Amino acid sequence: MFGNNCRLSGILLLAIVVGACSSDDGMSIEEMNDHATRYTAAWNSGDPTAVSMFFSEDGSLKVNDAEPAVGREAIAAVARGFMTAFPDMELQMRDLQVTDEGVQYHWRYLGTNTGPGGTGAAVDFNGYEEWTFGPDKLVVRSLGHFDEDEYQAQLNTPRALTPDSSDADIVAHMMQHEINQTQTDALAVNFPELTRERAYAIQRLRLEQTASDSDPLVGWKLGWTRLAQAKDVLDPIVGHYLQSRVHTPGQPISTRYFTAGTAAAEPEIVFYLKKDLPGPTVTRDEVIDAIDTVGIAMEFVGSRNVELSNREHSIVDNGIAAGVVFAERRYQLSDLDFTQIEGSVTVNSAETSTGKATTIMGKDPVEGLVWAANELPKYGMHLQAGQFVVSGTVTVPLRVSAGDRAMVAFTGLGSLTANFVE
C-alpha cells in the first residue's frame, strides 16, 4: 500500500522509469520515438510488468535525489504502487528531444490520488527523463527530473516541520492542513514554547502571502474575549479575514474549510470602521468615534492543531478562523445598550446556547475593539477604515456540519440563519 511518502517515492521513480538516453548507442530517432510512444502506452495500460520490460534486466532508475531502483522487479513494484495510488493515472508524451547530452523524454502526468490512504487530490504536472540505452535497445540508466515541491503541493501533503523550520515552512504546513481539513500536532511537538511575537510574525507572513487585489484583507476576528466567570483570566488573540472567507448572507455555506467538515458556530457583534485606529494608545472614545455601524455575525471556528495547548499556536492558526457571515442590517452604536443585549446560537431548531454581550472582555464588545486597536500595532498591524472587527462569541458555540441549519439572534438586533453544505 502506498502512504504519502510511498506515493512520493513512486512518482520519483516514475520519472526514473522513463530514463536516460544518449545517441551513441546506435538507435535512430525513429526507434527512440517508437520506444517512448510504446513506453507511454505501457504506463497507461495499468500493467506494471509491461513498464519494466522497457528496461534491461539490470537497468537502473534514479530521479532527483532518490536512491536508484535496480532491475525489472523493482521497476515493476514502483509502477504497481504508483498505479494503485492513482487508479485513473494518465501519462502523456509531450516531446522527445535530442541534445548534446543525450535524449530527453518530456512528459505530463495527470491523476487523482484515490488509492488506499489517498488524499483525493488531483495532480497535473510536467517532468522529463534522460535516457541511456544499451546494446539491446532497452534502457540501462534513467535520470528523471521534476519539481518535488509542486508535486507535494498538488498532492496536499503538508510540509514536515522540525524545530528548525522557518516561518514560511510553518505557514505552508498550517495552510495545507486547512486545505486538507485535517489537524496537526507539529506545533505542539516542535514549538511548545513559541513566543507571541513569533506567532504573530507567522500570521503576518501568511497574510502577506495570501492577500491580493482579488482577495484582499477585509477584517479581523477576536478570540477568547469572553469572560464567562469573574475568576477567569482573559488572554485574547487576533486573526484576520480575507474576502474569500466572508460568506454571502442567504446563500448555503460550504464546509470546505471546516476541520474534518465541522466547525463551531458563534454569535458575535461586528463593528464596521470608518477611521483608522493605528494604536497603540487608542482610547475608548477614539474607538467609538471610529465606528461607522454595528451588526451581528455568525462566525465559524475550528482548530487545525490537534491540541489547543497555548494561544500562540492558535495565533499561528489565524485565530482558528474558518469563515464568517454577516446579517445585512446595521445599527448606530449610540442606539445600543449592551447591558440589555443577549445573543444565542441554535442548531437544527433544537440545541441552543445563550450569553450576554457584557461577557466580552468582562465589559462589552467595544472594549474588545479597544484592546485589538492597541494590541495589533505591537506586531506590525493595525485596524483600518473600511475593515470590520468581529468581537468574539458571547456564548459557548455549537457544532455545525453539512446538512445542519443554524441561527444566531441578538436582543433587539434581529437574527441570521445559515444552511451548511459540503
Image (spheres, rainbow, N blue to C red):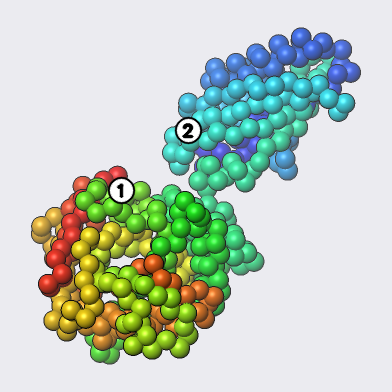
Residue drawn at x 28%, y 52% as measured from the top left? 248
Quadrant where the image shows the C terminus: top left
Q: Are marks 1 and 2 in contact (CB under 8 Å)?
A: no
Mark 1, secondary structure of its residue: strand
Q: Which residue is mark 1?
A: 254
In front of the other: label 1 or label 2? 1
Give the residue type that dot 2 points to. Answer: Thr
Count residues near mark 2 (Cα–Cα under 10 Å), then give few for <14, some for 14-19, many for 20+: some
Count residues near mark 1 (Cα–Cα under 10 Å), then give few for <14, some for 14-19, many for 20+: some
Compare marks 1 and 2 and give the one earlier in the sequence.
Answer: 2
- Image location of residue 420, percent across then percent down: 24, 49
* Left or right of 304, for residue 357: left
The answer to whether residue 370 is above or below residue 408 is below
Q: Quadrant of residue 5?
A: top right
The answer to whether residue 222 is above or below residue 234 is above
Residue drawn at x 39%, y 83% as measured from the top left? 371
Q: Which residue is mark 2?
A: 112
Residue drawn at x 75%, y 32% as measured from the top left? 143
Disc number for residue 188 = none
Give the residue type that dot 1 points to. Answer: Ser
Q: Nearer the viewer, residue 121 or 392?
A: 392
Q: Quadrant of residue 267?
A: bottom left
- Image location of residue 276, percent across then percent down: 43, 76
* Left or right of 409, for residue 301: right
Mark 2, secondary structure of its residue: strand
